[in-house]
């Protein structure tokens, strides 16, 4: 019996796939609302959902590329207190970077998407990357200077 999976089913397929299963197992999945019968109306609905998903993905990629144009090659400057040995007090976190970027350039970024191994703890330039989309990464610089 052919069914359209509504959720991932272990060893059978992923959500949205059309699979051929034994009638008993297919009915079990249909009763659990993890699948629907592969009728012509359900197939049309699936195709419509796939087209909509593809359109949204293209739109998200386009928006990420536009945001990359804005973010790329920007520079943030932080003035920090420095001790006698040239080390700063504390560090600059991803949250502070995102807040400063929004304040200076008016662009809201997601701190969870910043690619930064650790907080910035030294004077000078640091390259920071941000994953805007799975295919789009933007880069900018953060400069720490002495107050």
Image (spheres, rainbow, N blue to C red):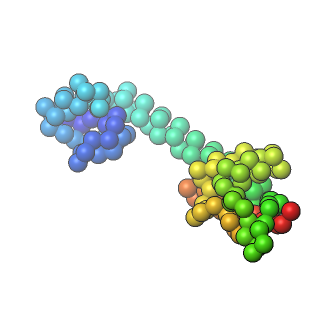
Question: In this image, 111 relative to 17: left or right?
Answer: right
Toward the top, the furthest residue is 31
- Relative to 94, is 84 above or below? below
Residue at 13% in and 31% down? 24
In the picture, residue 79 is in which quadrant?
bottom right
- At which x and y percent is residue 71? 75, 56
- Relative to 137, is 25 above or below? above
Question: In this image, 106 relative to 120: left or right?
Answer: right
Question: In this image, 144 relative to 28: left or right?
Answer: right
- At which x and y percent is residue 65? 69, 54
Any part of residue 87 in sight: yes
Q: How many marks can you see? A: 0
- Relative to 31, is 76 above or below? below
Residue at 47% in and 35% down? 49
Q: If the image is split into quadrants, where does the C terminus sit?
A: bottom right
Q: Nearer the viewer, residue 35 or 50?
A: 35
């Amino acid at each position: 019996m052919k069914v359209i999976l509504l959720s991932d089913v272990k060893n059978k397929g992923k959500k949205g796939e059309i699979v051929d299963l034994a009638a008993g197992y297919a009915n079990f999945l249909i009763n659990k609302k993890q699948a629907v019968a592969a009728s012509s109306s359900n197939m049309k609905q699936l195709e419509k959902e796939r087209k909509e998903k593809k359109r949204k993905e293209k739109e998200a990629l386009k928006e990420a590329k536009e945001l990359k144009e804005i973010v790329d090659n920007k520079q943030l400057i932080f003035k920090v207190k420095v001790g006698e040995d040239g080390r700063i007090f504390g560090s600059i976190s991803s949250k502070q970077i995102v807040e400063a970027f929004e304040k200076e350039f008016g662009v809201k970024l997601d701190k969870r998407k910043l690619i930064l191994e650790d907080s910035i703890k030294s004077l000078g330039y640091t390259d920071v990357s941000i994953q805007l989309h799975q295919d789009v990464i933007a880069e900018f610089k953060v400069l720490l200077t002495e107050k």
